[in-house]
Image (cartoon, rainbow, N blue to C red):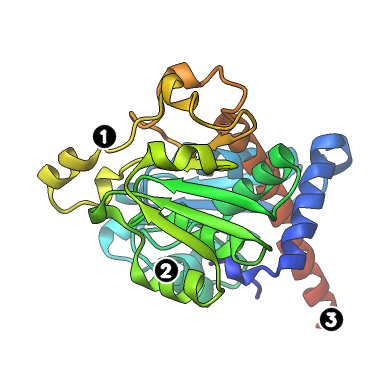
Amino acid sequence: MRSVIDITDLSKEELASLMETANDIMKDPGKYAHACAGRKLATLFFEPSTRTRMSFEAAMYELGGSVISMTDGATSSAAKGESVSDTAKIVSCYADIIAMRHPKEGAALVAANAASVPVINAGDGGHCHPTQTLADLLTISREKGRLCDLTVGLCGDLKFGRTVHSLINALSRYENIRLVLISPEELRLPDYVYNDVIVKNGMKCVQTPDLMWALPQLDVLYMTRVQRERFFNEEEYLRLKDSYILTKEKLNHARPDMIVMHPLPRVNEISVSVDDDPRACYFRQALYGKYMREALILMLLSECEKNDAKTY
């Protein structure tokens, strides 16, 4: 049973195919309006979410399917001590595909190993967030016209930022990507991502705490919030939470064709004064995510149908 737990579960060719499908859905949504008729998506969210959960649900509805959901682990059998594995087995009885978010790294893989339907990782702790990366790739492709020959700045919480970890993994497949990692020392990219992805793939990379130094060089600026829920120490969070705040004045130092991205939600790291700047594309990025999730649901369910046909 094919699941998507990490962005590396998808080949470069599959990424291109998903983007092609997403672009086609945008161009002609009516063509896909009944593609998932009679199919059910289960959204299992053990952590709060707005964009990811609702975009998955909107995606399934727009494909003609239906949705059953769990939006709070405290109101599910998990509160009684049910394991992720057992939950996945049970929900597989009721749905054709599962999208799951969980605060623990590796929980989505546990669910995928137990489920009898495809599982899509909608974020597992500070590990990875593959469908956000799908949204990110489509955003860069549509806004910049390419996925190679780019200088990409990743700014903020690079230690716990699962969206950043997944995006670096994806970008490592494209030619001539230069990364500028912008963070305080305490929130630097984990060594396992730096060594296993950046170094291993020979990516050009520089690390700096200085956003203003980095800005003039960038084709893409990917802002992230400092995630309160990942900190064990409240004082440490409060000290670091406003490390970087992008303002309209700071954008004057950036290229006129640079794009500003953010996986959202934002807190203080992007001033609302930036929203009207044509380079700000984080709200479009959220919309692109819905179309990429539609494309992924279609791909996984189509593969299920082909596999089922082979068993007869």
First along the sequence among labels 1 and 2: 2
Of 189 and 104, nearer the camera is 189
Question: Residue at the spot x=27%, y=60% of the render?
Answer: 80
Give the residue type that dot 1 points to: Asp
Give the residue type that dot 2 points to: Tyr
Category of crowding for the residue at label 3, using alpha-carbon neighbours closer than 10 angstroms: few (below 14), some (14–19), many (at least 20): few
Q: CA distance from mark 1 to mark 2?
A: 24 Å
Question: Residue at the spot x=53%, y=63% of the render?
Answer: 204
Q: Are marks 1 and 3 in contact (CB under 8 Å)?
A: no
Above-or-below relation of 302 to 232: below
Q: Which residue is mark 2?
A: 194
Q: Are marks 1 and 2 in contact (CB under 8 Å)?
A: no
Name of the residue lying farthest toward the bottom: 311
Q: Is residue 286 left or right of residue 158?
A: right
Above-or-below relation of 241 to 295: above
Q: Secondary structure at mark 2?
A: helix
Q: Position of residue 188 (x, y in %)?
A: 32, 57
Of 140 and 8, nearer the camera is 140
Quadrant hosting residue 220: top right
- Nearer the camera: disc 1 or disc 3: 1
Category of crowding for the residue at label 1, using alpha-carbon neighbours closer than 10 angstroms: few (below 14), some (14–19), many (at least 20): some
Q: Position of residue 281 (x, y in %)?
A: 59, 31
Q: Which residue is mark 1?
A: 242
Q: Position of residue 288 (x, y in %)?
A: 66, 39
